[in-house]
């Protein structure tokens, strides 16, 4: 039976000696371990000029055995690399049957420094140590695109936007296949309220990632927020309809942004004068108990009330009064104008 497979990414081996060893082992294992039942000839994916293994993206219907042979062989090769990431998926009707995330985990100094720095990125109070380790990885291997991208994220979290932008640009220059660097650069532009520039990078993220990756949906959501800021209602509606219709699993971080996404969907629909749909979106947002949003309850009630009013539904006065009682001045002003 044939299944859909997706494989993409890049590995950098750093020097000719390692590269030659990997080529030799790839050919040997493909022929002797897997009887040549793999998806790639070495000439398809290896570049002697760059000392890399690169798969911009393969999407193909293959047999499960062929896919697993290929994923096993690529995972083996990844342990010779100094930097890089490969991902492979085996999918049946949208269901992920197998996912392999491949990256170097050897005892090489650059690899260990990167892994240590990456583990510290999101730990509060460890920002300087994270930067120190990631800088060490870069010093050991100056083409370490992932180390530049992670160091950029730390600088972004510390609101050092110039430093973050410098590192994101460097990461993209070294590895243009990595969607996370474009996503990070978009977050810098968003923080600076340069929404058109953020949209440009988020569109690249959507091209360089797949819908099976969390970053794809993060990009959709933030792109919709940019469109809302620019009052590009139809474009925001397109992104948010896709996001809100997605059935995220409980362990998927995007699931916790559904409440905000439904609220923003309502805002975009109101801007587009689709009042009944906007009301439904606001109702869904309010009904969701969990979410990362920091939208005041009063704002949710005011917007739902205005959607009811515009849609000719009852109950809008109560929503506006409840919002005003929570200190929403805009709701109080609307009530006063109605009176």
Image: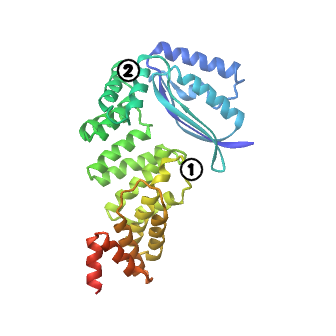
Numbered badge on residue 114: none
Q: Which residue is mark 2?
A: 141
x and y percent of residue 95 in the render?
64, 48
Q: Which residue is mark 1?
A: 249
Q: Nearer the viewer, residue 339 or 52?
A: 339
| Left or right of residue 74: residue 119 | left
Q: Is residue 299 above or below residue 339?
A: above
x and y percent of residue 153 in the render?
34, 37
Q: Is residue 337 above or below residue 288?
A: below
Q: Nearer the N terminus, badge 1 or badge 2?
A: 2
Q: Residue furthest top?
A: 17
Q: Nearer the viewer, residue 109 or 256?
A: 256
Q: Is residue 235 above or below residue 69?
A: below
Report the Cα–Cα distance between label 1 and label 2.
Answer: 37 Å
Quadrant holding the N terminus = top right
Q: Residues within 10 Å of mark 2 (few under 14, many from 20)?
A: some
Q: Quadrant of residue 228?
A: bottom left
């Amino acid at each position: 039976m044939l299944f859909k497979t997706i494989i993409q990414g890049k590995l950098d081996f750093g020097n000719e000696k390692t590269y030659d060893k990997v080529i030799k082992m790839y050919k040997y294992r493909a022929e002797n371990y897997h009887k040549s039942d793999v998806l790639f000839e070495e000439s398809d994916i290896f570049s002697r000029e760059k000392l890399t293994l690169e798969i911009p993206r393969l999407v193909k219907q293959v047999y499960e055995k062929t896919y697993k042979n290929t994923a096993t062989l690529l995972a083996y090769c990844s342990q010779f690399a100094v930097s890089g990431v490969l991902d492979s998926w085996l999918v049946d009707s949208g269901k992920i049957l197998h996912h392999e995330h491949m990256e170097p985990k050897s005892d090489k100094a650059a690899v260990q420094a990167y892994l240590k720095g990456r583990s510290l990125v999101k730990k509060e109070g460890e920002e300087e140590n994270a930067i120190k380790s990631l800088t060490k990885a870069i010093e050991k291997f100056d083409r370490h695109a992932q180390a530049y991208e992670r160091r950029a994220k730390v600088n972004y979290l510390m609101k050092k936007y110039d430093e973050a932008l410098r590192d994101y640009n460097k990461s993209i220059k070294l590895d243009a296949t990595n969607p996370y660097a474009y996503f990070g650069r978009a977050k810098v532009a968003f923080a600076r309220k340069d929404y058109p520039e953020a949209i440009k990078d988020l569109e690249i993220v959507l091209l360089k990632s797949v819908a099976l990756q969390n970053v794809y949906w993060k990009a959709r959501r933030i792109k919709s927020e940019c469109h809302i800021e620019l009052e590009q209602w139809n474009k925001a509606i397109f992104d948010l309809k896709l996001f809100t219709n997605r059935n995220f699993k409980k362990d998927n971080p995007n699931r916790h942004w559904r409440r905000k996404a439904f609220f923003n969907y309502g805002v975009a629909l109101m801007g587009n004068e689709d009042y009944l749909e906007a009301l439904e979106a606001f109702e869904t947002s309010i009904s969701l108990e969990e979410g990362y949003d920091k939208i005041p309850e009063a704002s949710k009630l005011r917007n739902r009330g205005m959607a009811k009013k515009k849609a000719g539904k009852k109950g809008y006065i109560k929503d506006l009064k409840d919002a005003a009682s929570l200190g929403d001045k805009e709701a109080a002003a609307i009530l006063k104008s109605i009176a």
